[in-house]
Amino acid sequence: MIHPFQLRMIQTELADVVGEAHVMSKEADRMVYGVDYMWLPRMWVDRGLIPPLPDMVVLPASAEELSRVLTIANTYHIPVTPWGGGSGSQGGAMPVYAGITIDLKRMNRIDEINHNSQTVTAQCGVNGYELESTLNREGYTLGHIPASLHSATLGGYMACRGSGVLSTKYGKIEDIVLACQVVLPNGDIIDTLPLPNHASGPGLHQLFVGAEGSFGIVSKATLRIEKIPQERRFQACLFPSLSNGLEAGRRIMLERLGISVIRLYDERETIKQVKRVLGISVEEGNYMVLGFEGRPDFLDIQEREAMAICEELGAQWLDPEAGWAWWNKRYNFYFPPHCLDLPWMFGTMDTLCTFEQMENLYWTKKRTLEEKYAKWDLEYIAHFSHWYPYGVMVYDRFIIQDPPADPEEALALHNEVWNVAVRTSIACGGVLNEHHGVGLKLARLVREQYGPAFQVLEGFKKATDPVNILNPGKMGFGPTL
Amino acid sequence: MLKTLQEYEHDLYGCRFCPMCKPSSEVANITQVESHTTRARAMMLWRYAAGVAELSRDEIELLYRSTLDSVSEAWCVNHYPVSGYIAAARRSIFSQGRAPEEVKGALEFYTSLKNKGDGDVLLLACEIAQTNEATMLDVALSILEKGGIRARALPLLDGSFAYSLGAEKEARERTSIVAEAIRESGAHTVYCDGPRTQWALTELALILGVELPKDIVIKPFAEVMLKVAQPAASAGKVFFHDCRSAMGLARTLPTDAAILPDCTGPEEVLGTGEVYELPRRVLDALGMERTFSVWNRAMAKSCGADDGLDLTYPELAMELARERIRKVRETGAQKLVTGSPLCAAHMRDALFEDKTYVAWLAELVYR
């Protein structure tokens, strides 16, 4: 533990790098950095408690300033937690060992939009909405449009291997990133190779994408961009069973039709969310939205073939307006009062597996959680929103409407549910998480997920961050030494 | 009529962890500091309203280093009452005598302008009063004269910035002074020099329970501008900046289409109402083509001269002005025009060079 006097000395050193206005130690300024979008710190505040807070917050404006800040932290063995938009749901930005929270939002420049190669280079702190709006004005889209667009930063997208609503067509963020600049804990600023598809050794940039700031802090990245589609279309339907819906999605993907959106809701979520938010009255069935975007002649083929597959499996078509309603109101789900919120306990337990395993995974997880937590009236709802050439992810959630009032009991129950959920996913062929990341919430399960392969991550961590200053307590790693 | 902060507890409960209005955060988007976001303030105020914690001196300063953040209210698809709860929090703090010294200083602001002109019609020049720019009064009176109206200008400070700073009693007193001045004048028609004046006279007076003289007709000054506007000699692309106070007079607030990153209009998705349409018709009459930004109408970002910020934290208010001008330039506009004389004066002050970039709409009509 660092004595407050020494902290004050270090604060002087940091102010020398970034300017006094960009080093904050007052509790009024630090409080919000203890709460991202994870349920636990929110519950903690709701119960009148104070979550883990950093000792100070520092806002560098460039990779050079970031480098000097990390050098100082490394010298004094101060834990460092990177912060982008604070919209992560896994507690990845919680400063559980105090120290310095580095707020990266001053590093928000869009350096270049390259029209010849259709790429964009931007600093990691650029806000998702600002980046997408800027690209739109130039006739492009990042193709990565997550629900957290308005609050997340580019660095945050990359830290957690995020996914957007159009990932089925354009890929997840790790598919879109071409190269990145990273600041290592020892202050070195490194660049990965300028392009990802090479035979020059392993893909170095992929060691940092998804590492949640554990190996280095991404300061800048180059990503591919897409032209704004000439046309966008939607269709919406109801399937008589989830099985039919999943099979329709599988066949569409295996035909490699290249459609942009497949969103399939289980019956519970169809009735609960779709009706409530979109105002579409549905009493039974499994709602699916299909999205197509690109050239009209390509869309004709995609639409025809995809709809034929769906019809073979008993799809009942709704007015395409239903699909447009989802698209146009896709962010509305995340504003109060529609978003899931306290006093309920809830979590999104997304995972991914192959097509052949998904139905079993879904029903096993649903049955396991609903039976085991029947006394808490645990509700399980799900939709399937990111599809891959080989499989599909399930965006499943648990909801407990009346969790324990006592914060310790609530924390214990929350963690227990997560243990069961994630272990069930893994046992059924899934992974720890599909696009929200590991953070604090799942850190204890990383070693279990990787088994002996974890030593590879551990070795890389020891090499890049021997003192373990970067985001300690996350990704299965321990505290700062 | 004025709610306590506790009465907003349910709204604060919804806002306290929600990160969705980050793009609309005026101060946070300049400083990039998380504690300056709506979410941070909502969390802080929820803890206070729910009795979890008292507000520290630093937190009170955070509360005041901002406008009332009504732009976040407009942005939110469910229009949570952000400005309402910030105003309520300030009233609570002010009534306890805990408002920062800067607030107390702001309330001592006075205008050096004197009544001018003579006539049966009043020009209520509360915004101009806050600028202390006598030439603006002259411009306004000339336009009224061109429109066949003999008017007397009353440059009085209204209760709006006192209200915004949480000084409820002072706000009521100032509004009463304005009401009394109108009554004493015997005028039946009152033109308001800008949207804030109009809001203060129509909406704020009601909120504060101040009775206006019966049968007075309150009109926007832009109505007269429309009557006399002639096509300008050198028309160019302009950006029309809507004053934040105009949102209080809007007929509808932004639709949820406004938050989509590819929103390019139509403008009406950003809010509708005469307060927005009328000055635009004046620009049309002047033959000026307008550029578009999603940050306009009810979603206009503050120029800095809103909610008393220019009087409490003028450096911050100037930064907001510079940021606003910078964003307007990005739209390709050759000029920034506003229907608010206070916005125009403030933003001109923020420019180091080429102060002609910013104009009050009346100045274009006058030329």
Image (cartoon, coloured by chain):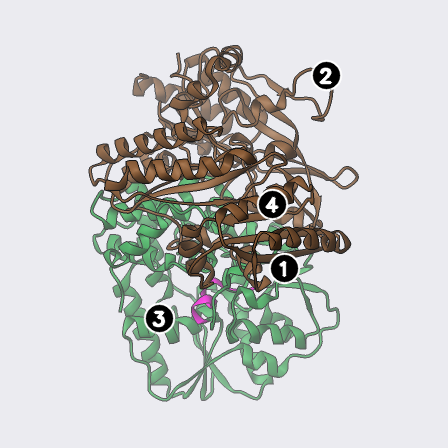
Chain for numbered disc 3: B
For the residues carrying marks 3 and 2, which lies nearer the camera in this image?
A: 2
Q: Amino acid under label 2?
A: Ser
Tint of chain A:
brown
SS of the residue at dot 1?
A: loop
Circles 3 and 4 on the same chain = no
SS of the residue at dot 4?
A: loop
Q: In which image quadrant can residue A204 be found?
A: top right
- Which residue position is annotated with label 4? A166
Chain for numbered disc 1: B
- Which residue position is annotated with label 1? B264
Q: In which image quadrant can residue B163 be found?
A: bottom left
For the residues carrying marks 4 and 2, which lies nearer the camera in this image?
A: 4
Mark number displayed over residue B310:
none
Q: Residue at x 48, y 50 (%)?
A: A241
Mark number displayed over residue A200:
2
Which chain is depicted green? B
- Which residue position is annotated with label 3? B204
Magenta part of the chain? B241-249
